[in-house]
Amino acid sequence: MRSLDDLRRTLLRIDRRGYKAYQEIEGRYQGNAYLLMIDQVQGDPFAAPSRVRVLLSQDQAGFPPELYPTTPRRIALQDYLIRRFAEAIHAIVEGSRGSGRSGFIGIDCGGQEVLERTACLVSEQGVEVRFVMGLPAAGRTILAHEAIAMCFENLPRIVDESLRYSRLEPRSLRRHLEVVEDQAALRAQLREQGLVAFLGNGAILPRRSGVDDRPLRGDGPMVIPLQAPSELEVTLHAPHAGAVRGMGLPAGVTLIVGGGFHGKSTLLRALERGVYPHIPGDGREQVVTLSTAVKIRAEDGRSVAGVDISPFINHLPFGKETRNFSTENAGGSTSQAANILEALEAGAELLLVDEDTSATNFMIRDERMQELVAKAQEPITPFLDKVRQLYAEHGVSTILVMGGSGDYFDVADRVIQMEAYRPLDVTDRARAIREKQPLRRLHEGGDRFGPMPARAPLASSFDPSRGRREVKIDAKGLRSLLFGRLMIDLGAVEQLVDDSQTRAIGEAIHYLAMRCFSRELTLREALDTLDRELEDKGLDILAPYPAGDLAMPRRFEIAAAINRMRSLKIAMSNEQ
């Protein structure tokens, strides 16, 4: 292993040479303060920056073991260090030092959610941080002195400011860890309390905008701390916050109603994101949802491969099969039916549905339409007639935003009205209305919900090659994933929150194709296998090199990406 002095000498030797000479500095360099690993050098100053790692032993970093004994605390500590590293970069790095990305230092850092990332790994042995550096050049000529300034001036200061326990603000660090650990504890209590979600009193749910997920601030009418209605107020217990009171949403079918702009979709959005822990100050630190919750919507134009949508759609014109339904261009109702069955296949226990993003004819068919169009001529069984069966037979709950149809009063266990961003329990009023105005429409759902899908993707569906490259996988932003020659559209997969999750999903698909689908496992069996291996070995199993830009995806978003691959082929079987 070379020393940091060797790195300095090599940089001086290649000064003013062509950019490719930078490849000579790849390798490991031991210093007194840390080990520097330059894993990959970029091909030119305009290419993706070079991949770099820093490793400190715990003797050098000094983090007490009590900061990371559990998985939630370890993930929170890693997240905190990544954010401090990013802040130090912003404060210390001067900016451009030449052409292209010259002088750039960056790390994969999160937003409002706390995710497990490969950018930082903490263990009893030490702290490893993975980041990128844009090696400086004028045109494509090496600027060694600028590179030396980055490696020997900027980087040591960044490491000292962010990765040494003695230099960190202990109250801020412990607050970060405690908030995340509390959220895990609250979420763990949901099932035993018969709940699917919990929103702590005082939560701030509105966000600044559709593209800014930070909490709305100020004293405006929307910035109203949440207060649970007395009928739904429960107490959970967190290890650090103690007794936490708030609104508990019970298992079953829950309606969220109210006028437009009163906060219905804002509440549902908070529940969607409640599957993740949030940073201190987010406003949703005590909003937790079952980790198996999936947002469902209509998705015109998506492809569907071998899904049994017969619980919702049957007797299509011209005899088209719905027990093994495939299409390159699904409509609103067929896409929403497929989205539900695919979520159930992946293990969803809670469906989150907003009428604004649903197909109207999938959600409801009223008595007048039933009288005009006989059931024999209508292939769609509305969700209204299946939602209770789904809970009764399979234990799958639903939280549904509904502002336009009171027919759902007949199937709801609980009705919450949002009034100026305040939740009110109006279940008794809804039941009184139901008794006063009984439905005359006919139930169209049959006696049972129907079978749960169990599909086995064919390994031949997954070809990651592109041109001369055997594997080409890349996230093109949050909602698009390049897999070989195929672009996967994830625009309707609303619980994705980070580009690095999307990138990890691409790697996970390749991993599953090589290790699971080649053995003809069902999709659910493959996801179970992947979950176990990720829990045992971490995200590093997905990449062929030490990647610093992967974040933990949920199994539901991995399944969603697989199901949206237009190359997907299925061997179909059904389980009751």
Image (cartoon, rainbow, N blue to C red):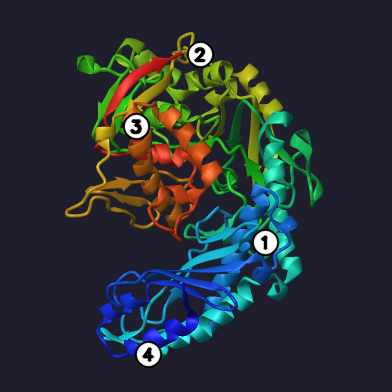
Question: Could you tell whether 474 is left or right of 228 in the image?
Answer: left
Between the C-alphas of marks 3 and 2, the distance is: 49 Å
Q: Amino acid at mark 3?
A: Phe
Q: Residues within 10 Å of mark 3 (few under 14, many from 20)?
A: many
Which label is found at residue 281? 1
Look at 32% across and 79% down and name the residue there: 22
Relative to 148, say whether 255 is above or below.
above
Between the C-alphas of marks 3 and 1, the distance is: 42 Å
For disc 4, the marked residue is 12
For disc 2, the marked residue is 440
Q: Position of residue 47 (x, y in %)?
A: 30, 71
> Is residue 11 among what the camera can see?
yes
Between the C-alphas of marks 3 and 4, the distance is: 51 Å
- Front-lying residue, 532 or 377: 532
Which label is found at residue 115? none
Q: Mark 2 falls on what kind of element?
A: loop
Between the C-alphas of marks 1 and 2, the distance is: 49 Å
Residue mark closest to the camera, 3 vs 2: 3
Q: Mark 1 falls on what kind of element?
A: loop
Sequence-wise, which precedes: disc 3 or disc 4?
4
Q: Quadrant of residue 431?
A: top right
Sequence-wise, which precedes: disc 3 or disc 1?
1
